[in-house]
Image (cartoon, coloured by chain):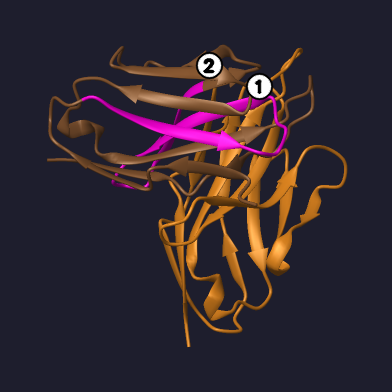
Amino acid sequence: AQSVTQLDSQVPVFEEAPVELRCNYSSSVSVYLFWYVQYPNQGLQLLLKYLSGSTLVKGINGFEAEFNKSQTSFHLRKPSVHISDTAEYFCAVSGKAGGTSYGKLTFGQGTILTVHP
Amino acid sequence: DTAVSQTPKYLVTQMGNDKSIKCEQNLGHDTMYWYKQDSKKFLKIMFSYNNKELIINETVPNRFSPKSPDKAHLNLHINSLELGDSAVYFCASSQERPGVGQPQHFGDGTRLSIL
């Protein structure tokens, strides 16, 4: 079984400031990790994913995340945010299975990022 | 050219009614999912189908019955609607391969309100 904890429910930040959204996970098996973004009244859009290899992954809209296996974390960062980044961000994990994982995603509680002018 | 489309977008109905939500994907994916997002925005998987076969069924009441006529469609029928069923229901799809985590593509959601 997996669980995901997003440590901040809300993160307010000023435009052009850097931001970090924190995500920790718990799993008894190796995992794939994802960050999704949800704009108001829309579905979830994939920002980035970690499957294997380099622990620093880059995604869309200037976001990046770093996988830290020892700390079981997958924090999302952006060096300079825009007003348009205001949205809710979800961290998710799925377990790597011996066979097909069928992609069962376990989500965190979400972090609302609000960018102020 | 919507990838994952759900209908209807909004559904307002009375307690005790039966309703269906439809989902279609044109991505050629072989796996489809239903998620429920509650009022606190918490997302939880309900069902997953792979090539029309039920793979995941998370402790969901029997009143919820998914149906996949083909791998591009996954519908959700809900009987005897209750107040607690009010939520946003998301359909998603992915191309699953053994040992490879594929991202899921989500529809825009169906906002179900029970009066």
**Residue at left offset 74%, top offset 31%:** B101
Instruction: Chain letter for mark 2, please.
Output: B
Magenta span: chief secondary structure: strand
B23 lies above or below B61: below
Nearest the viewer among B87 and B66 is B66
Nearest the viewer among B111 and A36 is B111
Q: Which residues are magenta?
A: B18-47
Q: Are marks 2 and 1 on the same chain?
A: no
SS of the residue under disc 2: strand
Q: Which chain is orange?
A: A
Amino acid type, residue under disc 2 in the picture: Ile
Q: Which quadrant: the N terminus of chain A?
A: top right
Tell me where residue A53 appears, x and y as whole percent.
Answer: 87, 41
Residue at image mark 1: A102
A33 lies above or below A10: above
Tell me where residue B51 appears, x and y as whole percent.
Answer: 66, 16
Do we see residue A71 in this rendering?
no
**Residue at left offset 53%, top offset 19%:** B68
Locate residue A64 relative to residue B37 in the image: left or right: right
Residue at image mark 2: B56
Instruction: Chain letter for mark 1, please.
Output: A
Amino acid type, residue under disc 1 in the picture: Tyr
Give the quarter of the image for residue B65.
top left
Chain B: its colour in the image is brown
Locate residue A88 relative to residue A101 in the image: left or right: left
Nearest the viewer among B115 and A87 is B115
**Residue at left offset 55%, top offset 35%:** B24
Query: Disc 2, disc 1: CB below 8 Å?
Result: yes
Task: Say whether residue B25 is magenta.
Answer: yes
Q: Residues within 10 Å of mark 2 (few under 14, many from 20)?
A: some
SS of the residue under disc 1: loop
Tell me where residue B97 appears, x and y as whole percent.
Answer: 78, 23
